[in-house]
Image (cartoon, grey):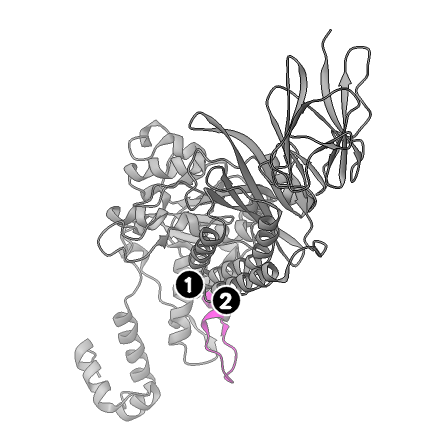
Amino acid sequence: MSVDYVLQIASGTNVGKTWRLDREPAVIGRSAECTIRIVDSTISRRHCEVWVDDDGPHIKDLGSSNDTLVNGAPVSETLLRDGDEIQLGAYSLRMVEVNQTTPMPEGNASDVSTPATVALSEGFFIQDAPEKNHTQSATPQLSQFRGLLHSHREFARCTNVADLIASLSRILDQRFQPEAWWLVRVLGPDRKPVPHPLSTATSADTLPAGDIQKALASKCGFLMPRRRMLGGKPSIETTIIAPLIVADDQIGALALRAGTPHRVYDESDLEYFLGLAHSFAPYLCAAEQMEQLRRDMERLRRQGAADTSLIGDSAAMKKVRELVGRAGKMDLPVLLLGETGTGKEAAARMVHDLSGRANRPYVIVNAAAIPRELFESEMFGYEKGAFTGATRQKVGYFEEAHTGTLFLDEIGDLAVEHQARILRVIESGKFNRVGGTREIGVDVRIVSATNRELAGKEHAQEFRQDLYHRLSGFVISMPPLRDRKSDIPALVEHFLRRAQPAGPGGKLTVAPSVLEKLATYSWPGNVRELRSCVERAVALAQTDVIEPEDVMLPTEGKRDPDSSSHLLTLADAEKHHIQRILKRHKGNIRSAAQALKISRVTLYKKINDYGIDV
């Protein structure tokens, strides 16, 4: 008949809790490396051990301070029988023999453990504000306080995330000596926890998802001891996890791992680690916000006065706005097609602003403008010392756009050898910095734009079709301005408001004949060309009304339709303006110079330079 032996708590906390014994010796004590852990000051760190052999269950004292008592008598080692009472400090355990005719004793072996009794497979929780341990001396408390104060000072010196993590790494190495540690971030609309291995962690060091979920769900510190094989020998490893919480928002967690013979963690380590995580979380949040602010300022400087709106009420533009709105609600890659100057960048920005990533980074990259030899370092960043001149770590565009949107403009001009790298990152969400060995995971939405045709076998030599299919999850075609000329009045009004200088002067208006003139032009440069035309007219206007003579358009018959140089140069515009002023003042140099707000000497020089007849 098969017989099992079970230990059951008879008195103390968690009365009725049971552990099944087997031939593997189970150590009982309050140390984190014990198989059966009972956290109580009357129990030694390694109090005793129990095991089962052919003769039955045995118990052996391991040099405990308060002895191991069986039925009231101290023992060094003895054979146990059914019903024996084992006294360990303030706790009493009962040996129970279980067979087919004797049911398993009622208890709560499957219940969640408390700090009083913790089995190896269940773990240990400690609340954010643990009850004061009156048995603890003041010296360790003072030491912990000083350590946390030092950590605060170290964190306060850091002005970016990289420095902050480096500072935390030094503190962890000094206080905890971890074999591996992780920074866990909560990402995406589903708030999925993603662990990022740091320090000495390798790809073989994984953090169980169940441990992360337990710590995040409970908003408590979490300690988990486990058995492991190290060099062919059994040992104990401990993992501690502490949530990162800022203003009731759970932004992630910190996790450490160590094990015998190197180091094991106990509840005092967890308590200190929890305090360290609470200190670190607001500094991490502030550093990320500061970096985002720097990126936004840089983006605004790059964009300058770039237009980010889609103006017009034509049927074509209503369709575009409808598609942009639908694309914003999805998280698919978006491909914007259209001629140069049709507003692809404005549409890309609207897709981002209407998405769930609107408050996240929006990074613009002109793929055609990056030199081939700098492509990888610009897109993926590089490590310090990766090459001559790499005196510091640099974050690439993909990492900069993490959790947000990356806009790849002119994607059709990307070199074929670089298309493969982009495809790999899109498919795996991972990459390595130049000179780095650690894979970096990113969560980025790709919006791309091109004025070239990418689909079809005839274009396969210039653009990878597998990359095209990954980029074209949602395709939007931008109509040329010649196909929506009814939008020209609204566009002119929009650009006029942006172009005219601020001040007490009267508001500029446009004569109806100007709009008629603009409607007769084919606009090969599309909206961008119209904007330049309006800005130039504002500069040339002499009154509050822009007249047809203020609007300069290339002569259709003389212009090469394939040429991109059809717009007047600044010198041509200046010459034309001087001629108009001289004509208005009937060739009077003094009056013309005053109207132009330049000296007569300067005006004479420009007349000679431009060959103007007076």
- Classify mark 1: helix, strand or loop: helix
Instruction: Report the amino acid beneath label 2.
Output: Arg
Q: Give the range drawn in magenta.
A: 498-514
Percent of width and height locating residue 211: 60, 38
**Left or right: 21, with 382 as reference point:** right
Give whichever of 109, 59 is nearer the camera. Answer: 59
Residue at image mark 2 = 153
Percent of width and height locating residue 95: 75, 24
Determine the residue located farthest toward the top in the rendered image: 1
**Is the residue 191 above or below the residue 48 in the image?**
below
Seen at 32% across and 85% down, the residue is: 596
**Is the residue 181 above or below the residue 495 in the image?**
above
Please name which of the two marks, 1 or 2, marks the residue nearer to the observer: 2
- Using the numbered discs, state the Cα–Cα distance from disc 1 to disc 2 in whole angstroms: 29 Å
Query: Which quadrant of the view contains residue 588?
Result: bottom left
Residue 298, numbered label: 1
How packed is label 1: few (under 14 Cα within 10 Å), some, or many (20 or more)?
few
Percent of width and height locating residue 606: 21, 81
